[in-house]
Image (cartoon, rainbow, N blue to C red):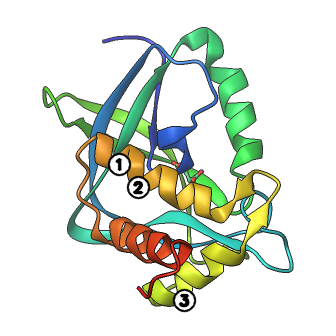
Amino acid sequence: MRSGLWIFGYGSLVWRPAFPYRERHAAAIDGWERRFYQGSPDHRGVPARPGRVVTLLPAPGRRCVGVIYRVDDDDVDETLRALDVREQGGYDRVFVDALRTEGGEVVSALLYRATPENPNYLGPASIEVIASRVLESVGPSGPNVEYVLRLAEALRAIDADDPHVYELERVVRSRLSGSRA
Ligand code: SIN
């Protein structure tokens, strides 16, 4: 058993962890799906006009692919302190079993999940409506568009199957290039 803490990332943590880690692997969690249903008043939008970022919804029979990171014991406290601040806009810590997609190892991993009860939750909307909000939102961490495009690219790089993210990426790209979605 290797020491340290495993952290599962499925959103910005896939492409911008911003903490030190020993190992990084593609991994899957069963019974969850990724959705752009969380409002971001502090990173990819502002309180009066929150952007849209991902959270996880329970989804029996579904699988969400992301990334696990192994953080050294010495770095765990500082990493969690920083992540608690970064994810303070509605996300809670949860432990899940994560399956490495190569090799089949299962580890207990911490993730940050925003439930529908949190005050910044925006909930379901059509891909067209989500894309409109993404295209008009900018926050202290940058444009909401960057979040969508970088997440889609990072998920493609680990062979993650996620029609919700890729369809949003397609609509956003097509509107950016001026063609009809
Ligand atoms: C995550 O990436 O795992 C949490 C949500 C986010 O920060 O985008």
Residue reaching furthest front? 178
How far across and down, in percent of the image, does residue 165 sit? 39, 66
Q: Amino acid at mark 2?
A: Ala
How far across and down, in percent of the image, does residue 141 sit? 76, 50
Towards the viewer: 69 or 133: 133
Task: Look at the numbered disc 2 and give the secondary structure of its residue.
Answer: helix
Image side of residue 56 versus residue 41, left or right: left
Q: Amino acid at mark 3?
A: Val
Q: Amino acid at mark 1?
A: Leu
Cα–Cα gap, marks 2 and 3:
18 Å
Towards the viewer: 57 or 165: 165
The answer to the question of whether label 3 and label 1 lie on touching residues, with beta carbons closer than 8 A, is no
**Would you identify the image quadrant in which residue 108 lies?**
top left
The answer to the question of whether label 2 and label 1 lie on touching residues, with beta carbons closer than 8 A, is yes
Q: Which residue is mark 2?
A: 152
Mark on residue 155? 1
Neighbour class for label 2 at 10 Å: few (<14), some, many (≥20)? many
